Amino acid sequence: MTRMFKAELLKLRRRRTLIAAGLAALAFAVIATVAVLLSAGSAGGGGSQSRGPTLASLAEPGGATEAFSTGASFIGILVLVLFIANFAGEFSQGTFRTLLMRQPRRIGLLAGKMAALLVFVAGTLALAALMSVVASLAFAPTQDISTASWLTLDGLGEAATSYGTALLVVTAWASLGAALAVLVRSAPIALGIGIAWSGPIEHLTMDFWSSAIQWFPGLLLERLADGGSADVSSSHALLVLAVYVSAAAAAAALSFRRRDLTA
Amino acid sequence: MTQQPPTLSLHGLTKRYGRHVAVENLTIEVPAGVVAGFVGPNGAGKTTTMAMLLGLVTPTEGAGTVLGHPLSEPGAYLHRVGALIEGPAFYPGLSGAQNLAVVAAAGGHDAARIAELLELVGLGARGDDRFRGYSMGMKQRLGIAAALLGDPDLLILDEPTNGLDPAGVHEMRQLIGRLADGRRTVFVSSHVLSQLEQICNWLVVIDHGALVFQGLASDLLNRSATTIIAVPQRDSDLPQLERLLNAAGHHSEVAGAELMIAVNGSEPSQLAAEVNRTAHADGIVLVELGPTKTTLEDRYLAMVNGGDR
């Protein structure tokens, strides 16, 4: 596992990859911050009916990472797609074959690769969080938002909570995407299944079966990213998602260990 | 050579995919230190057999050892094996050197050897170029460099000359010859024996998943049937000469304007003399008489096409 972790990090540590990740984090921070601050400004100083943050709520300790939290709730599908493409690509390129001839302990290979990718994602997410705080500090004066409470202990605590929640959500999406790719071994098919399920299927099902929100992974991840909702608590979402992720990881590990690698 | 335990020893190895039998009851042994050609037509089961040796495919039946370790425990021997199977598979966006670094890290090998290996396979000047820009020959050579990362005792190469032009085939053959320094065993497959016969001293021939021949390449050549060709001055004498020789206990048959007489263990020169005497005694004048020896490739083709098992 350690060897595969290092091997995967070698791929991720390339300058091109690091620059792409940095630019993505910067774009995410700027777009999320501008969008959140502008929408809060147009919603008025407070008492808005919308679900989004208000100028008043942005002045609270969690205001510095509000843009990050809001933006992070939209990147789940992107992470799903990236992990499916990465893992399925190892099959289609034949590189799993090359690696398995060097690291025949298959579950260790999968675990090492997944760990390295998650470390990279965690780092990119931290960079995005930091950049969004900086962007928020820079843009806040344009909307007359007080930043006095942002850099307090409470503010840092809120920021850590936002980051932790986003990391959990991203890890869950990543795990489901990787597991789907390993089970299906084809990027187009896995992407089709993943996007169709987490998009239209879950949301359409929710229209005629309201309890879907309590049990479907995509819907639960949306609620978890929002910090829970009136109908689904964060703890319930976490518990059910832990079951989904564990089951998906176990199925993928079993499949990868037992099936022949003929591609 | 035969003092050491065999590098590869397979017993009754079988792989089925549903009703399709890819490898059937394959029992082979490859001594240590040889360059073993693994030959058979496309679809004969060569790649599946190699994939089973490398732990990529699980046998349906049978057992075996690689470097003394059971086939069921690839983790025990793969660090001593270098392989290129089903074509070179690397990350297109990474350079040759970066790809080797990834493979070295995954295998726990010394990355300091990368430059040396790139030089060895003739990619020293192109190591920093991206893999996606490599020609087929360069990709194959990078695959061999990756296989050599752990300085393996056993090198398994699956059709390394595939997709190469004649010059590339020649270069690859020379490279394999250099790698086979007598210390390591090389197990190299091809569907064209002529691409391997110059470098192999051991041959394993399979067809339709089953063993056809295994042993020293020279043994296969010695088993080659030698034929005497006799050409009478008059074509009309061919049936008469055939009848006379067959009546004398030989096996002959007309092929065009020639009569082919199977040697069947006889001394070719003595048989030729006997054919000459028989023809002369019947007033038949021969304008051509002599042995024709089949090549290793002819023998191989006869085996895989003619069911010579």
Image: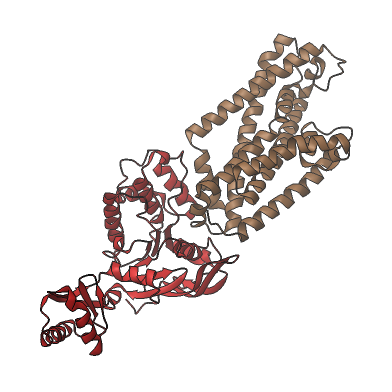
Chain colours: A brown, B red
Q: Residue at x 84, y 36 (%)?
A: A206
Is residue A148 or residue A196 the one in the foreground? A196
Regarding residue A118, the answer to whether it shows in the image is no
Task: Choose between B214 and B109: the one closer to the eye.
Answer: B214
In the image, B302: left or right of A93?
Answer: left
Closer-to-camera residue (A234/B66): B66
Q: Is residue B309 above or below residue B188?
A: below
Residue at image point 25% right, 75% down? B254
Asked where in the image residue B279 lies, by quadrant, the reply is: bottom left
Quadrant position of the C terminus of chain B in the picture: bottom left
Residue A51 versus residue B252 in the image, above or below: above
Of residues A227 and B303, the one nearer the viewer is B303
For the point 60% across and 51% down, the residue is A110
Measured as percent of width and height from the top left, residue A169 is found at: 72, 37
Please, which residue is most extreme toward the bottom here?
B248
Q: Position of residue A23 (x, y in %)?
A: 56, 26
Identify the image quadrant of residue B17: bottom right
- Left or right, residue B51 beside residue A168: left
Total numbered labels? 0
Quadrant occupied by the N terminus of chain B: bottom left
Q: Measured along the vertical axis of the image, is residue B24 above or below residue A66?
A: below
Q: Is residue B181 visible?
A: yes
Residue A22 found in image quarter: top right
In this rendering, the answer to whether B144 lies above or below A125 is: below
Q: Indicate the position of residue B283 as horizontal and vertical percent values.
A: 10, 84
At which x and y percent is residue B297?
29, 67
